[in-house]
Amino acid sequence: MKRDLAKELYKFYRSGFRKTQNNDQTNESREKNIDPQSLEAVLAEMVAGRNWGQGIAEGNLFSNWAEVVGVEIAEHTTPISLVDGRLTIQSTSSAWATQMRLMQNELLKTISNSAPGALVEELNMIGPHAPSWKRGLRSIKGARGPRDTYG
């Protein structure tokens, strides 16, 4: 009797397909018996598993700045960066930067109470940006700033 390889392969793959189809159906019925989890629980598990807690707390500090420090202070200050526990805050004027330096301890307490996951250990207050004399129409290479610019 002659062996037909094509028929044997067809039967082999066909029987394997039936077995996997049945296994898929039993897996689906098993999955239906599992209770669904709430989205909050899934997200909390994902945040804890990937150690995102501190990053989320820092992001909330930046996005909710007005709620953390108050509306009046938030109108005149902006958090710029948080690196190694040092929060840099830019003020609209040098007077506000000075006032914020005087309130630094109170502000640290407020931040630690409002955003406990954000590790803020130190505040750095800066004033508004001054114009740069290093580039532009009236700059000279090797010059020492505005005192050399106008001759």
Image (cartoon, grey):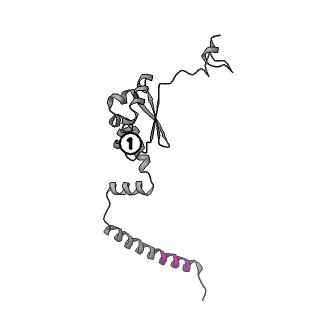
Residue extending farthest to the right is 142
As shown in the figure, which amino acid type bears the numbered disc 1? Asn
Q: Nearer the viewer, residue 135 or 5?
A: 135
Q: Give coordinates of residue 96: x percent, y percent.
A: 41, 25
Q: In this view, does 48 lie above or below 61?
A: below
Hey, which quadrant is residue 70 in on the image?
top left
Q: Which of 7 and 57 is in front in this view?
A: 57
Q: Give coordinates of residue 101: x percent, y percent.
A: 42, 30
Q: Nearer the viewer, residue 57 or 94?
A: 94
Give the side of residue 42 with respect to residue 16, left or right.
Answer: left
At x 45% / y 54%, what residue is drawn? 51
Give the side of residue 68 with respect to residue 55, left or right.
Answer: left
Please give the range of residues in magenta.
Answer: 7-17
Do we see residue 101 in this rendering? yes
At x 36% / y 27%, what residue is drawn? 75
The local secondary structure at tag 1 comes to helix
Do we see residue 93 in this rendering? no
Give the side of residue 130 with respect to residue 69, left or right.
Answer: right
Hey, which quadrant is residue 42 in on the image?
bottom left
At x 39% / y 47%, what residue is drawn? 117
Q: Give coordinates of residue 5: x percent, y percent.
A: 59, 80
Q: Is residue 21 above or below residue 133?
A: below
At x 32% / y 60%, what residue is drawn? 37
Residue 14, magenta (yes or no): yes
Q: In which quarter of the image is the C terminus?
A: top right
Considering the whole magenta stretch, tell me its main secondary structure. Answer: helix
Q: Is residue 2 above or below residue 17?
A: below
Residue 120, magenta (yes or no): no
**Residue tagged 1:** 60
Q: Nearer the viewer, residue 106 or 29?
A: 106
